[in-house]
Amino acid sequence: QVQLVESGGGLVQPGGSLRLSCADSGNIGSILTMGWYRQTPGKQRELVAFVTGGGITKLVDSVKGRFTISRSNNRNIVYLQMNSLKPEDTAVYYCYADAMYRDRTWGQGTQVTVSS
């Protein structure tokens, strides 16, 4: 079964940090780009960040300077380091992977709540 497994969400106070991880179960194949979206109730899913197979990264303006995206050496685990978290970062975060000859694969989602 093709699968991405996410971990690292939770409840944190404003100004705190969390690190999300997303790992390929081993069945996706040759992954090209991995990244993260987030979604809040009633809103469309928003692209947060991605990293290509060549190591090029892009983050949405609202998280620049606070979030960092990185990828493991074997290229099949992606991390989202989130610092200086704000209440507006509260959302369900979904990782994804784009691979050759396959539709986009999504993780199951992990809740991030920023609240005092």
Image (tube, helix red, strand yellow):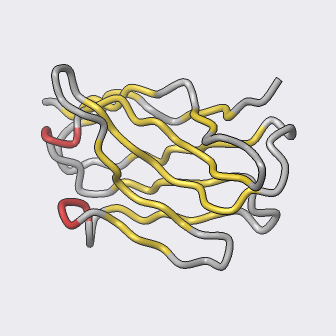
Q: Looking at this rendering, what residue extends furthest in the front direction? A: 101
* Residue 46 image offset from top left, x and y in percent: 29, 44
Query: Residue at left 27%, top 47%?
Result: 16
* Above/below status of 37 relative to 64: above
Q: Is residue 83 left or right of residue 106?
A: left
Q: Residue at x 47, y 54 (%)?
A: 80
Given residues 63 and 49, the one toward you in this image is: 49
Q: Is residue 56 above or below residue 15?
A: below
Residue 95 in the figure: left or right of residue 49: right
Q: Position of residue 111 (x, y in %)?
A: 38, 26
Q: Residue at x 82, y 63 (%)?
A: 74
Q: Nearer the viewer, residue 80 or 15?
A: 80
Q: Quadrant of residue 103?
A: top right
In the image, is 71 to the left or to the right of 58? right
| Image quarter hosting the N terminus | top right
At which x and y percent is residue 116? 13, 30
**Residue at the location (21% across, 67% down)?**
61
The answer to which image quadrant residue 68 occupies is bottom left
Task: State the image coordinates of residue 18 (x, y, percent, origin top left).
Answer: 41, 45
